[in-house]
Image: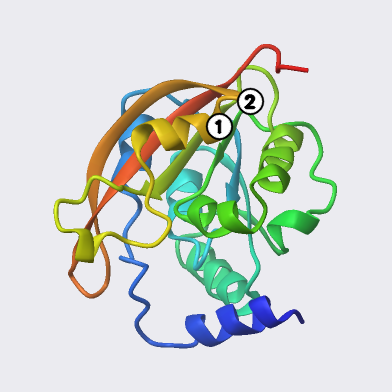
């Protein structure tokens, strides 16, 4: 087990996890409700305890989801079992994914991108290139640099331009807006919700 996986297992062993609200992400519910993404094959990157993956499965999506933490995957499998839905959960590092079959029409993460972008942004883009195809949609959440109080600005916070620059080699922007997310601590944080579409061709 890698040190990173062990650290996340320790985090998921805690009864409360400040980064998880226990509810499906509002933005994910919104794009499903509005029909921006219709039921299809979907891949969740860094699924945690499976809240969002299970939500999508209840909406008719064929969900594959992974996390680096074995304990998180066990919790996610238990969550899916409780509501009798099928989700293809597995443990993996985002940079060492197994063969997952054809590209996915929809891929999303709820906070993995800001964690890995400083480690290996190019590697993360390569992963996205492998699991998507032209026309695929990608939804991500990122800390927002436009917080009024600099002391409350989270690490890895991004401007709108900065976020788009990082994805523009592969994706066009469909929708970008600010929203608040609530953690288990009941604190709210300003984030970006970015919905992007894979370009028909990428710059050489």
Q: Say what secondary structure mark 1 lies in.
A: helix
Q: Residue 153: percent from the left, percent from the top?
A: 27, 59
Q: Is residue 193 above or below residue 83?
A: above
Residue 86 lies left or right of residue 91; in this view the side is left
Identify the residue under disc 1: 167
From this viewpoint, is residue 46 visible? no
Question: Residue farthest to the right?
Answer: 99
Identify the residue under disc 2: 170
The structure residue drawn at horizontal position 33% and vertical position 42%, both measured from the top left corner, is: 192
**Residues packed near mark 2 inside 10 Å, few (<14), some (14 to 19) or many (20 plus):** many
**What is the C-alpha distance between the residues marked 1 and 2?**
6 Å
> Who is closer to the viewer here, 70 or 115?
115
Q: Residue 40: percent from the left, percent from the top?
A: 58, 30
The structure residue drawn at horizontal position 46% and vertical position 42%, both measured from the top left corner, is: 140
Q: Quadrant of the C terminus?
A: top right
From this viewpoint, is residue 125 visible? yes
Question: Residue farthest to the left?
Answer: 148
Q: Is residue 185 above or below residue 33?
A: below
Asked whether the residues under the numbered discs 1 and 2 touch, taking CB atoms below 8 Å apart as contact, a structural biologist would say yes
Residue 92 lies left or right of residue 175; in this view the side is right
Question: Residue farthest to the front?
Answer: 150
């Amino acid at each position: 087990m890698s040190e990173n996986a062990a650290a996340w297992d320790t985090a998921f062993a805690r009864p409360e996890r400040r980064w998880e609200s226990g509810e499906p992400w509002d933005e994910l519910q919104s794009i499903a409700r509005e029909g921006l993404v219709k039921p299809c094959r979907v891949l969740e990157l860094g699924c945690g305890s499976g809240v969002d993956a299970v939500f999508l499965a209840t909406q008719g999506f064929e969900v594959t989801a992974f996390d680096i933490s074995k304990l998180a995957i066990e919790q996610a499998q238990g969550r899916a079992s409780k509501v009798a839905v099928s989700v293809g959960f597995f443990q993996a590092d985002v940079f060492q994914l197994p063969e997952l079959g054809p590209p996915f029409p929809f891929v999303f993460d709820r906070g993995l991108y800001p964690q890995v972008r400083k480690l290996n942004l190019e590697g993360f883009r390569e992963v996205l290139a492998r699991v998507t195809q032209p026309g695929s949609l990608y939804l991500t959440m990122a800390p927002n640099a436009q917080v009024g109080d600099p002391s409350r600005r989270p690490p890895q916070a991004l401007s709108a331009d900065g976020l788009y620059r990082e994805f523009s080699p592969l994706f066009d922007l469909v929708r970008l807006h600010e929203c608040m997310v609530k953690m288990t601590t009941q604190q709210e944080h300003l984030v970006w919700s970015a919905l992007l579409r894979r370009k028909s061709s990428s710059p050489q």
